[in-house]
Amino acid sequence: MIPPSPPPPASWKFSVRDALIAAGAVTLAGLAVWNVLQNMQGAGLAPGFAFLWQGAGFDVSETLVPYSPADPYARAILAGTLNTLFLAAVSLVLATVVGLIVGLMSVGPSPIARAVAGAYVEIFRNLPKLLVLLVLFVAAVTGLPHVRQALSLGPVHLSNRSLLFPVPVLEPGHALVLAAFGAGCGACWLLARHFARRREAGQAAPPLWPFVLLALGGLPLAVALGLGLPFAWSVPQLAGFDYEGGARVSLQFMVIAVTLALYHGAQIGEVVRGGISAIPRGQTEAAHAIGLTPRQATRYIVVPQAVRIIVPSMNNQYVNLIKNTSIAIAVGYSDLMSVSGTVINQTFRPLEMMLLTMAVYLAICLCVTTQLNRINDRLRLKEGRA
Amino acid sequence: MKFLFASLLLTTASLAAPAVQAGAALDDIKSGDALVCLVSPNAPGFSVPDSQGVFQGFNADFCRMAAAAVLGDAAKADIRGVGFSDSMKTLVARGGHLASRSITATGTRDADAGMAFIATTFFDGQGFMVPAALGVSAAADLQGATVCAEDGSTTLLTLADWFADRGMSYRVENIADKTARLEAFFSGKCDVYASDVTALNSDRMLAANPDDYVILPDVISAEPLTLVSQPDQELESAVFWAFQVMLNADKFGITSGTIDDVIADLDSQPQEVARLFAADGAGADMAAKLGLPADWAYQVVKQVGSYSEVFDRHLGMNSPFKLDRTKTLNASVEEGGLMYPYPIR
């Protein structure tokens, strides 16, 4: 019913067998490295990462940090890594939302909702994601209008190139406004702690929200007005071939995020469905018997138990999703894989670049796994505690 | 192995120092009765093994041209598929006589003592394709344009250099999947499609209506794909002039199908044709001096064909690539291209 906590790890004991296995593994790895180094030396190549500081000389389609072809390879790789992280973060949130909706639909009371969710899961679980990506990309690029006939809603424009929207541009003095906002945050935190202590001590305390509004909204606004609003808006304007100004989200970014959300949404939906289905019917009936409404039964009895089953499987889903962002290369989103591929073609440094790329993906995935494990530990039923 | 390679390099360098080669490579071809020719192992249209494992294609035919000129028999070309950098190493180490594999002639490569560039068989370069409706007539009008190009390719580098040199801004769409890349261009996600001109010509044919797209006249990189041999002045001359025979054949409209009729009635031919093929003409004179079969020029045209014949057979209208040679740099000078037949007299 509820997964029991794993037994504490057995204390480590020396054994000859373990030592031999470890020695064998180390020897094999050492031989492999030695062999590669020998072969590279034979071909006149010296392994090293000094090339990372040479000029890259190529452009990438979109970046979160300023980048030009004059920058070194290292900066191109940084730009690619940030693109991968941004895509992974957005897709992760979208896929989770889709998965929750699909999962809840498939255990809900409505037969139509169950059928829709079931069909959705079967379709997206059984199609290759690269195919889904290419179909959606071609559909979007041919279906959406050309940039000159962009769909416009005020200053927001959508074309088969990108989604464009205005962004504030910081002018001198904006730091003071940000400082005021920071000070507001600090004040809110202090007040919240103070009020909480008073309540704990049984004293009356005024509601917090008017103070929050004043500190986070009123104070920065007053400072901004006092400085004569040190922000300007950068609005997209049609100029020449394309819009200039504003912020842009490329079509390929949106298409890949949607693809990953749909694909992993189906899988997460199954995880959610499985987690909820694993709670025996008797639990809900018992909840009803003690007078809880169906809503309360779900909220206080089913969900807390289901979450403990769902979270460990989500770990796997999230790591898979992060690695799957690498299909972005097919439709022109400059992620880490795309940039490192170009760097390899320029520098003929496949070994170094593959090691570097692997290290980055490994670091990202291990960070996510560690965080999810921490959440998992917190949710787990603790033995020996009431 | 490394020592062997270095000593070979040294030998080559010391042999290359005197101005005149003794024709060692040509002698080696004759004594072995085979011309070892290196091609790319798999380049559709240029060199691909057929069902018998024999290389066929545009580049493979220049191996046959050399064998027909030197040995009088195109079938004596021993055509081998070798990777790009390995083929240059093999030539330097004297493991092959000729390489016909889309090697761009560059200064640093030619400065290498172990290699001699002979004749450019294919002129390519990076260009731009735009929708005709855009009204752009030259690449200089592309300020601020979005350019679709293959992810990871040197196209990206050439683009970055070209726009930076002109102080022009642009946006790149580096799409790896070819279908996605072409769809993006045909539906207007990119204003411009950048690739080698040869590729642009064949990609244009994939549009619903190819006439809606034009290839701009600007070629922003030079890719002269050139025959390379071991340094051997006589071999170089033989291969260079065999190629000129193929260009001259085009100039006078002679093909492998018509050459026998031409020979049969040399008196009614233009003087230049007579000089090329007659038993007492300039062609025969060259053969005697270089040690080639007396009818070498006839054998080249008979067994391999004229330049346009070879082009059309593998890349042009008689091939799946449907390249219109007259619209590439490989058109003759008269057609506005770079193929300029040298006089044989």
Image: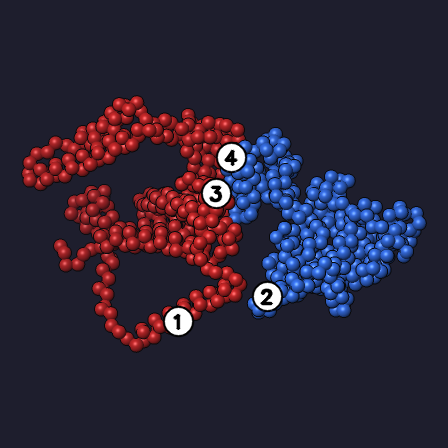
Find the distance from the CA under tag 1 to the CA under tag 4. 54 Å
Q: Which mark is residue B169?
A: 4
Find the distance from the CA under tag 2 to the CA under tag 3. 37 Å
Residue beneath disc 1: A27
At mark 3, the secondary structure is loop
Label 1 lies in what chain? Answer: A
Of all residues, the one furthest to the right in this rendering is B267
Q: Amino acid at mark 1?
A: Thr
Q: Residue at x 33, y 29 (%)?
A: A172
Q: Are marks 3 and 4 in contact (CB under 8 Å)?
A: no
At mark 4, the secondary structure is loop
Front disc: 2 or 4: 2
Q: Which chain is blue?
A: B
Mark earlier in primary sequence (2, 4): 2
Q: Amino acid at mark 2?
A: Ala
Please identify the quarter of the rendering in which residue A87 is found.
top left
Which is more toward the observer, B181 or A302?
B181
Residue beneath disc 2: B6
- Relative to residue A324, is residue A295 drawn left or right? left
Q: Amino acid at mark 3?
A: Ala
Q: Residue at x 18, y 37 (%)?
A: A189
Front disc: 3 or 1: 3
Q: Mark yes or no: residue A235 visible.
A: yes
Residue beneath disc 3: A70
